[in-house]
Image: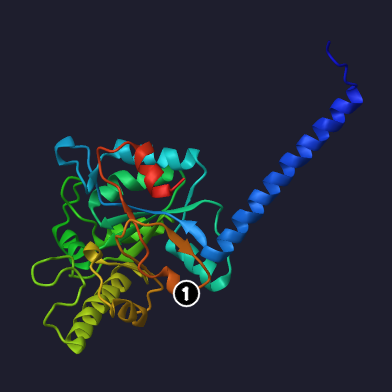
Amino acid sequence: MFKIVSVKKILKMLSLFISGAVLVSVLVYACSAFAESIRGVKLPIIMYHSILKDESKHGDYVLSPLELESDMLYLKEHGFTPILCQDLISYVYSDKELPEKPVILSFDDGCYNNMYYVLPLLSKYNMKAVFAVVGAFCDKATAENDPNPNYSYMSWKDCKDAYISGRVEIACHSDNFHTMARRVGAKRMGNESYDDYRSAFMSDTLSFMDKIKANCEIVPNTYVYPYGAVSDDSTKFIKACGFKVSFGVEEKMNYISKDEDCLYRLNRYNRASGISTEDFMKKALDE
C-alpha cells in the first residue's frame, strides 16, 4: 500500500532540500574565494604568432584565421574576458578589479597579418590582445612600405594604429634580439660578463623604447622575451627599464596576487594549428 503524504510535508521536505542546495553553493563559492585569496586569480595566457590562410604554412607557429575565430568564439561562449597587461598592473598596484574569468591573448613577432586578420576579429568579438613587436622588424617594414599579410611585419604606423584602436596593447619583443645567430634571444651568452650582458640588454631595450616613443608616442609596460630565453638577471634589467610585466613561454597556469613580482615571467600556452579549439582550450584554460 502507498503511504499518503500531505502537501504540507512535501513542501517542508522540498524547502529543506533547497536550503541544503543553497548552503552547498555558498560553501563552494566560499572555498573558491578562499583558494583565490591564497593562490591568486587564475590567469591563462594564450600565445599566438602568425595567422595565415595558406594551409601549407600551418604548424606550431602559424594558425588559420578560422582556427583563431573558433578560439575567440569559444572564449566568448564560455564566459572568458580577454584583458590587457594594464588591467593586471591596475589590479596589483591600484586594487582595481579583474573580470571573473580573465584571459590574455598575446601575438608574438608583430606579423602584418595580425593587423589584417586579428584586429578585425578583435573588433567583431569585442576583445583585446597584446601584440609583441620587434623594433628591427618594424624599421624594415616602415622602410619597405610593402604591407602584405603573407610575409610582412607591422610598420611603426601599424603599431600606432593598432594601439589607437583601443583593442591592442603593444609590447616590447626586443629591438634586435629576435635572433639565434650568436645570442639566443635576450639570454646571456656563456662567455659574457655580467657588465657586458647588462650593457647589451639595456642598450637593445632602451633603443626599442626610444623608437616606439618617437614613432608611436607609446611607452610599453610589457617585455616579451624572444624565444622565451631568460637569464637570472633579466628581470632586474627590465624593471630598470620601467617594465611592470614580462612574458615567458612555459606552458603553465598563472596565479595573480597582489605581489608585484608575480607579473614577471608569466607563462603562456602556445597555440599550434591542427588541434581542435576544444582540445586546446581544455589544456590552456584548465577547466
Which of the image's four quarters has the N terminus? Answer: top right
Residue type indicated by callout 1: Glu
Residue at the (33%, 41%) spot, across then down? 68
Q: Quadrant of residue 266?
A: bottom left
The residue pinned by badge 1 equals: 260
Depth check, front residue: 184 or 151: 184
Q: Quadrant of residue 156?
A: bottom left
Residue at the (18%, 67%) spot, across then down? 136
> Which residue is the extreme one toward the top?
1
| Horizontal and vertical percent position of residue 246 | 35, 68
| Horizontal and vertical percent position of residue 241 | 34, 80
Q: Is residue 121 visible?
A: no
| Horizontal and vertical percent position of residue 22 | 73, 43
Horizontal relation, residue 284 to residue 111: left or right: right
Depth check, front residue: 127 or 7: 7
Depth check, front residue: 127 or 210: 127
Q: Quadrant of residue 67?
A: top left
Residue at the (52%, 51%) spot, across then down? 101
Horizontal relation, residue 221 to residue 259: left or right: left
> Which residue is the extreme one toward the left?
181
Horizontal relation, residue 13 to residue 273: left or right: right
Q: Against 64, is 85 above or below?
A: below
Q: Is residue 65 visible?
A: yes
